[in-house]
Image: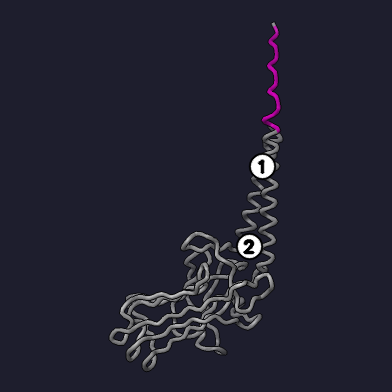
Amino acid sequence: MRQLRLALTAGLCMGAVLLCALISHVAVPLYDGVGFPDEPYRYVSPPSEETRTPKKPGIAETTVPLTSGTNASDLALSTRESGPQMLLYFPAHSLSAEAGSVRITATPYAPAKGQSVSNKALTGNYYHVRFAASQGDAHFTQPATAIAYIQLRLPQGFPLGGTILYRTADGSTWRTTGTVRTGSDVYQATFVGPGDYILASTPARSPANYTAVAIAGTFAAILGIAALLMVIRRHSEQPAPKPRASKR
């Protein structure tokens, strides 16, 4: 029984250590819409060979027909990764032009290497959002009844706590936005207008190191479970002690 108790204690401790290592250091993103893990983040300029992916990051684009010079209904567009790395939502009557339609595009670009804002590193790609009207200029107005917003997905290997930054154009100053976490690795901010959007996060270990830790931890947990099962099996195979004869 003493060996069994020791094995159970060791197994529980190992599981607790593994759980803390995987949760406290790095977020494990999940695609909230389906429940499957996200595909690896697609960088325009991968920070390392380990983060290079076969597919390039997607572009989000759509053409919105106007009714009486405005969009008559809500609309959303996103990039086509699983899960999407960028999503835009516009409520009805937030876009306008003289007539015709408004073309919306969100194109990913690589930020300057090593750039940080308020002691937070720029993570992933930044997305340049642009409007183009078929007639005249396109305009954006935040309606009083609903909020236009943008969502960005945090790349794997970074701890939770991202902040979405915005700037009007390339070369201008990044500024923080009111950011909320809406999913396991998804962050949302109010859409300000055409320009650039990116997530900033505290520096973290590289995705390659995270993968190594996860693999090593999983292997250690498997060994611990195997050892625990062996001890339980040996204990169950031990013959029961014979009852002592009573003395008269």
Which residue bears the numbered disc 2?
A: 25
Q: What range is drawn magenta here?
A: 234-247
Q: Residue at x 66, y 62 (%)?
A: 211
Tell me where residue 110 appears, x and y as whole percent.
Answer: 60, 81
Tell me where residue 109 appears, x and y as whole percent.
Answer: 57, 82
Residue farthest along the left direction in this orientation: 68
For marks 2 and 1, give the CA distance.
24 Å
Tell me where residue 177 appears, x and y as whole percent.
Answer: 49, 78
Q: Residue at x 70, y 37 (%)?
A: 231
Question: Mark 2 falls on what kind of element?
Answer: loop
Label drawn at residue 9: 1
Above or below — where is 59 with respect to 135? above
The quadrant in which residue 40 appears is: bottom right
Above or below — where is 38 with respect to 122? above
Q: Is residue 240 magenta?
A: yes
Most frequent secondary structure within the magenta stretch:
loop
Would you call the spot at circle 1 few (<14 residues within 10 Å), some (14-19), or many (20 or more)?
A: few
Above or below — where is 8 with respect to 185? above
Colouring rule applied to residues: one colour
In the picture, measured across the screen, residue 236 lies left or right of residue 175, that is right
